[in-house]
Image: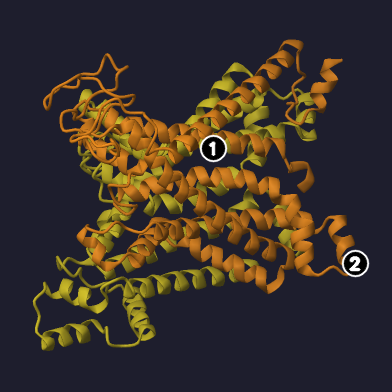
Amino acid sequence: MSNIEIITDEESSFVPVAESKAQGRVKVRRRGRVAMWLAIVWLVFLTISAIGANSLPYVPHECEGSTSKCSTAIYGDINRIERAPVWAWFADPGKDIGTGADHTGLMGTDTNGRDIFARAMLGARSTLVIAGLAITLGLAIGTLLGMVAGYFRGWIDVFIDFLTTVMLSFPALLLAIFLVTFFNDPDSTGGAKTRPIWPIIVALVILSIPPLTRLVRANTIAYAQRDFVVAARSLGARGSRILFREILPNIVPTLLSFALTGMALLIVAEGALAFLGLSVESPTPTWGAMISSGTERLRNGVWWVSLMPALVMFLTVLSVNILGDVLAQRFNTREAIA
Amino acid sequence: MRYVLRRFAQLVLVVVVVTFLAAVALRFLPGGNDVIVAIRSGGGVTPEQYQAVVEELGLDKPILSQYFSWMGDFLSGDWGTTWTTNQSISTEVKRALPISTYLMVYGQFVALAFAVPVAVWSAYRQNSRFDRVATTSAFGMLSLPNYIVAPVLMALFSVQRKWVPFPSTYHSLWDDPVAHFKAFVLPAATIAIPLYAGYMRLLRADMIGTLQSDFITTARAKGVGTRRLLFGHALRPSLFSLVTSAAVNIGSLMGGVVIVEAFFLLNGMGRLTVESIFRHEYPTVQYSVVILALIYVGINFVVDLAYAWIDPRVRAGRALG
């Protein structure tokens, strides 16, 4: 009996499934759910930490000339430079500079004696705001373009396709560099001013538009032929009504999973910009900037400065990817398209 | 044939628009003519000298005529010299292009060499232990940015164990093959990891779909062996998304791996372009952009034609339409 159930399942392979394998699949499902919940827990934790990054008592040590408002994420402790994380018994911090314990903090301290964990949580703020805003805007524009191209077809489709091809043919990183340097205040090269956040967002939005447009277009074409759309059209519904009331609700689930995957990519892209010195400037930490500042020290055995923020980024990107995958599987539109 | 010609015309137009946009963007970067003149002449110029440089570079002319004269230079092969070092731009590009090409080819080769067999076997034995390990690890690899992988690989293999030298000095494949491969092994691995994960997932998903189709059941019923069934019958119709994705990646790998190139100190196209922007070497940037755009567009063109080879249905569809 259970075999019948499994074969109707969309995931079933063509190989006849034995009883033991059926149990295996149930286990996989449960494991997938565990991964999903872990991802959600991590993202919730990260969000709360990011919001409360300035006030949460993460850091056991005080800053120099301690006042009540002193963040170890921004001001380092000169006595605690490059201390290994407390749990890293195998790390050899060298302890060249300063006094006190040679292991501090959940993730150790960086080259300026700042607490890496506190900094990573503060960095979550800028990273998530940049990636989140960029994907929201990119999705809004990409969806509009894609739906218009996929529904109306004709010359507007050709034009939008041309536009996306141009954007894709332009080397992506170059586009980002152009935009960020273009919108930066020329005076900021002096380094005194902090760079504004929005040129980075604009750059990432523009990078995310072409692939999203193409995906939405493909989805729209699949729905534009469906009976309910034809019915709406024959009832005299206008184009905008059909797009937003008939087609959009159907592609929203797919869009959500695109959004999550895209956000993961943008978190990584922001880090790449930070590597080229083009993201938000210090003292505002972003994960990319933190990782890049530590890579030099990696060769000297000081691994936590770079790898701890890398771990935070990895977990976040992984969580977002897992959620995107869960959504994509739940709203599998394959049979609707076919 | 008409389709091919129309597509070709469209792609030429794309290249023209891209290079024109690049020209406009470069002109409007902060600083404008002042920066260009300062870079060109080494700073400290009198107003007369300033005017002379502006006229020499044609900066006083309208942007369209500047663009067309640049286009003429590009087509005639006379690319001029860099502003600061007075080196021939075509020499610079000729030095960078093979490095990028090797990096791209090795990265893609490693990624595909692992991805295809793993994906085929994962799809065949879906939900087996092998499949679960393969899919989970691929998922993890997708979430690893190259700027994390590169320093870790470097610290492990060229600092702790001195297996490969750092920096990866470029050696020609023909002069010194061993040094050549040693220089490329870590960067290629860095590039291959996320590529492998992406390809593996794509091919596995498509393969699972193919293995459910009727012709596979027929082949199996005819008594076709497993290996022949998987690689002879099922693989080719499953290659569609993989080929598309691999081809699109060729373009982005040629110019988009600046960070990997920078980590391993390889002077490829990506680094040449980005550093030229930072040094305000605009002619070099323009030539890099046009080359990268040509590669991207050209490969897309080839892929479009290759679809017909992979999937005869496309050929038939085009003949009808």
Residue hosting label 1: A320
Q: Residue furthest front?
A: A68
Three-letter code, disc 2: Ser
Q: Position of residue A258 (x, y in %)?
A: 60, 46
Element at label 2: helix
> Which residue lies at the image location 27% right of the left edge and 87% below the top edge?
B60
> Which residue lies at the image location 37% right of the left edge and 82% below the top edge?
B68
Same chain for the residues under marks 1 and 2 in the image: yes
Give the image's coloring scheme: by chain
> Which residue lies at the image location 45% right of the left edge and 51% below the top edge?
A130
Three-letter code, disc 1: Val
**Colour in which chain A is shown?**
orange
Question: In yellow, which chain?
Answer: B
Q: Position of residue B149 (x, y in %)?
A: 36, 34
Q: Chain of mark 1?
A: A
Label 2 CA crowd tier, 10 Å (few <14, some 14–19, many 20+): few
Image-quadrant location for residue A260: top right
Q: Position of residue A140 (x, y in %)?
A: 60, 58
Label 1 CA crowd tier, 10 Å (few <14, some 14–19, many 20+): many
Q: Position of residue A8 (x, y in %)?
A: 82, 27
Q: Quadrant of the C terminus of chain B?
A: bottom right
Q: Residue furthest top?
A: A20
B225 vs B242, nearest the viewer: B242
Image-quadrant location for residue A172: bottom left
Residue hosting label 2: A234
Q: Earlier in the sequence, mark 1 or mark 2?
A: 2
